[in-house]
């Protein structure tokens, strides 16, 4: 059974998604931060243009100027772009004001990465006001449904607009999708109006808070139960679900702990699992282990047999260890929110069939990751290379729940 657990506090909201008691996803947001930067829209001012990098720096009011690459200035539809890429100086000039949307959080000493390819996510679709194309989630199961959704997308968009039909749109009616796109279209019109009258640099639109994103982005039909332990968060979530996902309301539950009893997260051992997932050495159930090392350029995961000696031959022992390792690496990448290049040093396998099975298993498991992952393949040195999109800085923060438990958790 797959459950979503929501733990509310005065200054923090935490969300955990578990499958048969095993933690697979974790999100945390401090209330004073008023949401993430990714998705926010600013009216910025071009500070300088760098022809050698085909990019510009834009002041959007943050401590570090944002980075705008030429591909994020050109039209988002490749067929609408010029055959020869122009110079950045032909498109942007210092002092020029423009609307931009944050696509990557500031990382380390770098400012945010921004784009002019605007997108507004809804429950069933992502609205792109100037993209001029239709997209369908790769997670939609059948080709017949993909074709139906694409046809519906063509009916509900206006000329020049783009929409991406999300997985939640599978099986939904034309009317539901029409309502979603109309709401987002009107919202975009309001954003543009605010942008026209605002003085740069300034924030024009901030993406929704974590409670709204919980319903909009995280709540799928795969979730069997949603448990919330805070009354105000429960009421806010219920109101949001009534508007965005009314069919899921019967799955919503309010958790009311007894006086002196364990909290929702304690009962499900969430903090213990977070602490275990954040350690450099992670123990596998078979007795092997994973050792995680992170550099500025990449993350390396070393797989060891450890105490696992197997029951038959060496190749079988190695293969079984690598299979469990692949399962856990896909899970831990999400919990640790690892981004960038990832190199996995699996234990050497003699049989090519085993190597392919391990790689395909990892590919299947990362498909359910909400962050884009790509398994590149085996290198000539026998290492498995993959990438995971980096949108925010990986960070381990101490989290203290309302009954005094203190552990390490990812921001």
Image: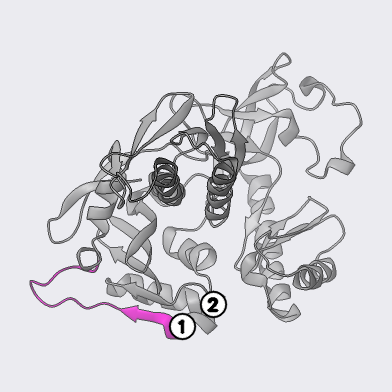
Q: Is residue 402 left or right of residue 197?
A: left
The percent coordinates of residue 244 (x first, y second) are 55, 74
Residue 31 visible, this orientation: yes
Residue at the spot x=85%, y=26% of the render? 85
Residue 42 visible, this orientation: no
Looking at the rendering, which quadrant does residue 70 occupy? Answer: top right
Q: Is residue 200 left or right of residue 331?
A: right
Looking at the rendering, which quadrant does residue 227 occupy? Answer: bottom left
Q: What is the total number of numbered labels drawn onto the structure image? A: 2
The percent coordinates of residue 356 (x first, y second) are 59, 45
Say which residue label 1 marks.
249
Label 1, label 2: how many angstroms apart (C-alpha)?
7 Å
Which quadrant: the C terminus? Answer: top left
Q: Are marks 1 and 2 in contact (CB under 8 Å)?
A: yes
User: Relative to the observer, which residue lies in front, 260 or 208?
Assistant: 260
Callout 2: SS: loop
Which quadrant: the N terminus? Answer: bottom left
Q: Residue furthest front?
A: 312
The question of residue 95 being in magenta is answered with: no
Residue at the spot x=75%, y=26% of the render? 92
User: Relative to the observer, which residue lies in front, 355 or 261?
Assistant: 355
The question of residue 257 being in magenta is answered with: yes
For disc 2, the neighbor class at 10 Å (few under 14, some 14 to 19, many from 20) is some
Residue at the spot x=13%, y=61% of the render? 403
Segment tinted magenta in the rendering: 250-264
Q: Is residue 143 left or right of residue 101?
A: right
Say which residue label 2 marks.
245
Q: Main secondary structure of the magenta part?
A: loop
Residue at the spot x=36%, y=34% of the render? 292
Callout 1: SS: helix
């Amino acid at each position: 059974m797959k459950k979503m657990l929501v733990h509310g506090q005065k200054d923090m909201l935490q969300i955990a998604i578990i499958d048969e008691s095993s933690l697979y996803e974790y999100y945390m947001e401090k209330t004073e931060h008023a949401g993430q930067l990714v998705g926010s829209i600013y009216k910025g001012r071009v500070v300088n243009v760098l022809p050698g990098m085909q990019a510009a720096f834009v002041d959007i009011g943050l401590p570090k100027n944002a980075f705008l690459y030429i591909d994020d200035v050109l039209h988002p539809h490749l067929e609408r772009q010029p055959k020869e890429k122009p110079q950045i100086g032909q498109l942007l000039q210092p002092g020029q004001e423009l609307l931009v949307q944050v696509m990557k959080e500031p990382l380390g000493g770098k400012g945010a990465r921004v784009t002019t390819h605007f997108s507004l996510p809804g429950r069933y679709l992502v609205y792109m006001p100037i993209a001029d194309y239709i997209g369908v989630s790769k997670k939609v199961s059948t080709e017949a449904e993909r074709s139906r959704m694409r046809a519906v997308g063509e009916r509900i968009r206006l000329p020049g607009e783009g929409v991406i039909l999300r997985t939640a749109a599978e099986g939904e009616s034309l009317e539901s999708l029409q309502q979603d796109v109309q709401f987002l279209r009107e919202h975009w019109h309001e954003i543009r109006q605010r942008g026209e009258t605002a003085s740069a640099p300034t924030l024009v639109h901030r993406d929704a808070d974590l409670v709204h994103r919980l319903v909009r982005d995280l709540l799928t039909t795969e979730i069997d139960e949603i448990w919330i332990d805070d009354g105000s968060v429960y009421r806010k979530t219920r109101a949001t679900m009534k508007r965005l996902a009314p069919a899921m309301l019967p799955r919503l539950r309010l958790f009311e702990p007894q006086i002196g009893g364990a909290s929702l997260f304690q009962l499900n051992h969430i903090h213990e699992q977070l602490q275990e997932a954040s350690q450099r050495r992670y123990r596998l159930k078979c007795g092997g282990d994973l050792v995680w090392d992170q550099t500025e350029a990449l993350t390396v995961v070393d797989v060891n047999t450890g105490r696992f000696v197997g029951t038959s031959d060496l190749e079988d022992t190695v293969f079984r260890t690598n299979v469990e390792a692949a399962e856990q690496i896909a899970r831990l990448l999400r919990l640790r929110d690892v981004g960038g290049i990832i190199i996995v040093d699996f234990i050497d396998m003699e049989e090519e069939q085993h190597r392919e099975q391990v790689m395909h298993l990892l590919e299947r498991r990362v498909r359910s990751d909400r962050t884009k992952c790509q398994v590149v393949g085996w290198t000539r040195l026998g290492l498995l290379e993959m990438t995971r999109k980096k949108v925010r800085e990986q960070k381990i923060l101490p989290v203290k729940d309302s009954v005094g438990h203190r552990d390490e958790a990812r921001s």
